[in-house]
Amino acid sequence: QVQLVESGGDLVQPGGSLRLSCAASGSGFSVNTMGWYRQTPGKERELVAAIIIGGRTVYADSVKGRFTISRDNAKNTVSLQMNSLNVEDTAVYYCCVDVAFYVASGGRYWGQGTQVTVSS
């Protein structure tokens, strides 16, 4: 079983910064791609950023140059540094990891979500 625990969501003013963190715990698996998605009411969940085990990163166009994703493979953690936040970044942010189990097929797991609100 894989458990994801997220932290870091908060209320911040436009132009401010936040750092989201997510830790994957459990045993019997290895973590492949780690990422962050976000969702607002009435809209589909969208990819914000992802990082593969080798370190290659992918970003949504809307966050390029402002957000930075990083991971610690030894701790199975992924972080999202968000700078120059604007009101359009307001959403629930979800951590997502793709894992491979040693004795079974892999899967995708989601965190519980953390609210980021950008408002003056």
Image (spheres, rainbow, N blue to C red):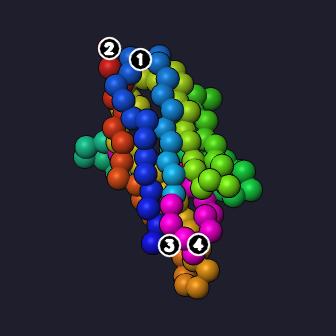
Q: Quadrant of the N terminus?
A: bottom left
Looking at the image, residue 77 lies above or below residue 107 = above
Compared with 38, 81 (above or below) is: above
How many angstroms separate mark 2 from mark 1 (CA)?
6 Å
Which of the numbered marks, if any, corresponds to residue 14? Answer: 1
Asked whether the beta carbons under mark 2 and mark 4 sit within 8 Å of each other, the answer is: no
Three-letter residue code for mark 1 = Pro
Q: Which dot marks residue 116?
A: none
Q: Which residue is mark 3?
A: 107
Q: Tell which circle, 3 or 4, labels the residue nearer the N-terminal end.
A: 4
Residue 69 x, y percent position in the rendering: 60, 41
* Mark 1 to mark 4 CA distance (whole Å): 39 Å
- Residue drawn at point x = 43 percent, y = 35 percent: 8
Of labels 3 and 1, the one closer to you: 3
Q: Which residue lies most toward the top here?
A: 120
The residue positioned 38% from the left and 17% from the top of the image is 13
Q: Which mark is residue 29?
A: 4
Crowd rating for badge 3 (residues with CA inside 10 Å; few <14, some 14–19, many 20+): few
The residue labelled by disc 2 is: 120
| Label 2 neighbour load within 10 Å: few <14, some 14-19, many 20+ | few
Q: Which amino acid lies under the numbered mark 4 shown in the image of this protein? A: Phe
Residue 11 visible, this angle: yes
Q: Earlier in the sequence, mark 3 or mark 1?
A: 1
Local secondary structure at mark 4: strand
